[in-house]
Amino acid sequence: MYDSEIRQLEKSLTDIFIQSFNQAAQAFSQLLMQKMVLSRYRIDMISGEQFIEQLGDKMEDGYFASIIRLPVELETVILFFLAEEEGRRLYDRLNGPTQDQSAISLDDLVSSIGELNNILGNNFVNCLANTLNLSIHGSVPRNTLDLLGAILQSIILQNDFADKSIFCADANISDKKSTAFNVRLVILSDKEKLMQVISQPEAQ
Amino acid sequence: MMERFIKMNEIYVTKDPYLIRTVVGSCIALCLWDSYHRIGGMGHIMLPQSNGDSVALPGKYADTAVKTLISIMKGKGGVISNMQASCVGGASMFQNHHPKYESVGRRNYQRVKNELAHFGIPIVTEAVGGTSGRKVEMNCATGAITISMLLKSWCMEPA
């Protein structure tokens, strides 16, 4: 493949990432009935280890996280995560404030975060499917509340991303002042496989 | 007490009274303690097996990390027969659709265990497997290991 073709494919993918992040922000706004915006995004080609390094100072903190895995030929993971305290506030916001916090089970909290990933993360699946003119189904979200370092390591290792060059499309979606909610949506994708799929004639 | 966070693939050994710590999910934190010379070391190991070009990052793979950690401990005056090990991590936090990668935590642990057996170093503390990440701290002045999960923690003093 020529350099110019590679650049064109990278540009197409970047457009898909940005479009899906904007749609996710819009969906989040509708859920919260509050304006949420794509406050930051970054698209890199890095290794899985470098991705973890970028989040260095948060490794020991508790985070809610949810992953959706795309079919094997795409080798792509959609990761949605937010700090534990923020996740609890978000749960209250979506379900109405609960007087008795002890009545909320951890399973309820964690599965709520998974549902959010279903709504926000699947925007990428839809954008990609529309571009490729294919039917793509993401997995059921897998959710957890754990130490961020442990979560990210497991995702990187279980998807064999440690040494590979991966697309890392990383976005923050927040209210305008980033004071209420600031969630992170990250798409990690095997660069070669994604480029291969998107370069198919039917995707042009 | 001075503190240090051990990053992925890093190996750190000290004779000073450091509190060294790391966070592991599927990775393995291997702590070695020479109780006589009071030398402590930790490796944060990612993968079970090197592919031959691991010289730049010997701490990344179980097969090279164990040898390197022992070698650095010996370089600081440690003796293998005084060493004892603690292994923490090897969790499977997200159930996986790819059986090929599902057991990476277990394979990491198995390889570390085999390497330690090769050197005759006993494992005195194990907190391995399961579905939760762990934070591990080693007090290099006493050899005590503290392991925490998000909702609970416990401490083991050396024998």
Image (cartoon, coloured by chain):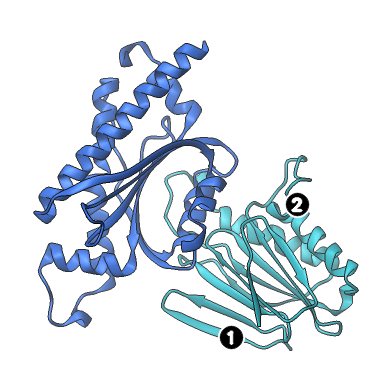
Chain colours: A blue, B cyan
What residue sits 40% from the left and 40% below the top? A42
What residue sits 88% from the left and 74% below the top? B78
Residue designated by label 2: B58
Quadrant in which the N terminus of chain B appears: bottom right
Identify the element where label 1 is drawn. strand
Q: Amino acid at mark 1?
A: Cys
Q: Position of residue B138 (x, y in %)?
A: 66, 78
- Relative vertical location of residue B101 with respect to residue B26 in this rendering, above or below: above
- Relative vertical location of residue A1 with respect to residue A123 in this rendering, above or below: above
Q: Amino acid at mark 2?
A: Pro
What residue sits 20% from the left and 80% below the top? A101
Image mark 2: chain? B
Residue designated by label 1: B155
Q: CA distance from mark 2 to mark 1?
A: 29 Å
Image mark 1: chain? B
Q: Between A74 and A45, which is closer to the camera in this rendering?
A: A45
Instruction: Evaluate whether residue B102 shows in this view.
Output: no
Q: Position of residue A11 (x, y in %)?
A: 38, 22
